Image (spheres, rainbow, N blue to C red):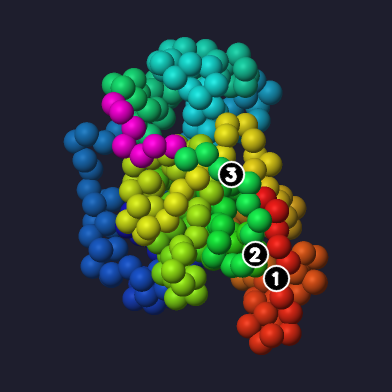
Amino acid sequence: MTELCEHVEAWRDQVPHASVKALCAAVQLPRGTFYAWSQRQRQPHPDRRRQAPGRAPRGYSVMRDGTKIPDGQILDWIVEILETDNPQYGYHKITWVLRRRYRLVISFKKVYRLLKSMALLWPQRRRKAQHPRRLARNWVVTRPNQLWETDITYGYIAGEDRFFYLQAILDVCDRQIIAYHIGLSCRAADTARTLAQAVNHRRPQWGAEPPVIRTDNGPQFTAHAFEARCEELELVHERIPVATPNMNAFIESWHAQLERECLAQEFTTFAEAYHAVSQWIQDYNGRRLHGSLNFWSPLEMAARVAAGLDQWTPVRV
């Protein structure tokens, strides 16, 4: 809810003539929730550190050469360190690895905070995993809703000096983006919500056998909130081995297209970035010609198959 409220607040700044009622309706947010959130933002909280008015908290660190690295990427590096170096490393040792391996300028305090935010501190890690890991296997995909891939990427808002995040779910057979999340953060609860949206959209189509959802080992996808939602929705969740992005090749390829054609532009505000990415996804699904779909767009190809004018090409994964 906080993220939706932030979206509405950003849109109010960009579209001052739009009513709160219309903006809230666009994201299905109750107006009362938005007004209550706005009231809390104006009231000082005794446990909240004061920040300069209007300045958003910094969601990145920098490398020694000045390159900005968003917290989401740092979390991915932390998970890789725990998977490949030593799962018992605490935040001190992880900080040193980040500094030496990735040339990151980062404090012990920030690494501790990142670990704590994803329940990766040692006391939490000692508990037996509630959701056993299922490794990705080889597939021959012959129909939609057989295998979905999802991952998280990010873009930069130059005008606000902060990053935003995008999670998308792609059907490996028909190449459609089924559901997506765009926000100033992307937590496990956000990925779980996006997954539920995809299921609600596609459930009437898949019959008796639900799709498998494939992810990497990012903290959002190994968290209890995401795993529990997979079980609730009766989906099988498989994770690729560490450092094998080629096993998530279809969503990675889609990210590369998105980067070249959309994220490479300079955004002034989050609202501008949100609109640009949403429009790009809409055009991708409905208008962009796809070589593996006989040079039809994903939606056009689906319509042709439904009408008996074409058929799906098996995909080896």
Could you tell me residue 317's position as x and y percent? 67, 50
Mark 2 closeness class: few <14, some 14–19, many ≥20 residues within 10 Å:
some
- Is residue 244 found inside the magenta-colored segment of the image? no
- Label number found at residue 137: 3
- The residue nearer to you, when weighing 207 against 89, is 207
- The residue nearer to you, when weighing 61 against 293, is 293
* C-alpha gap between disc 3 and disc 2: 15 Å
Residue bearing mark 2:
142
Residue 62 lies in what quarter of the image?
Answer: top right
- Residue situated furthest bottom in the rendering: 307
The structure residue drawn at horizontal position 50% and vertical position 60%, both measured from the top left corner, is 211
Please report whichever mark, 1 or 3, sits nearer to the chain's N-terminal start.
Answer: 3
The structure residue drawn at horizontal position 26% and vertical position 36%, both measured from the top left corner, is 48
177 sits to left or right of 89: right
Please report whichever mark, 1 or 2, sits nearer to the chain's N-terminal start.
Answer: 2
Residue 178 lies in what quarter of the image?
Answer: bottom right
Residue bearing mark 1:
312
Instruction: Find out whether the residues at labels 1 and 2 contact each other: C-beta distance under 8 Å.
Output: yes
Mark 3 closeness class: few <14, some 14–19, many ≥20 residues within 10 Å:
few
Q: Amino acid at mark 1?
A: Trp
- Is residue 132 found inside the magenta-colored segment of the image? yes
Q: Give the residues in magenta.
A: 127-133
- Residue situated furthest left in the rendering: 46
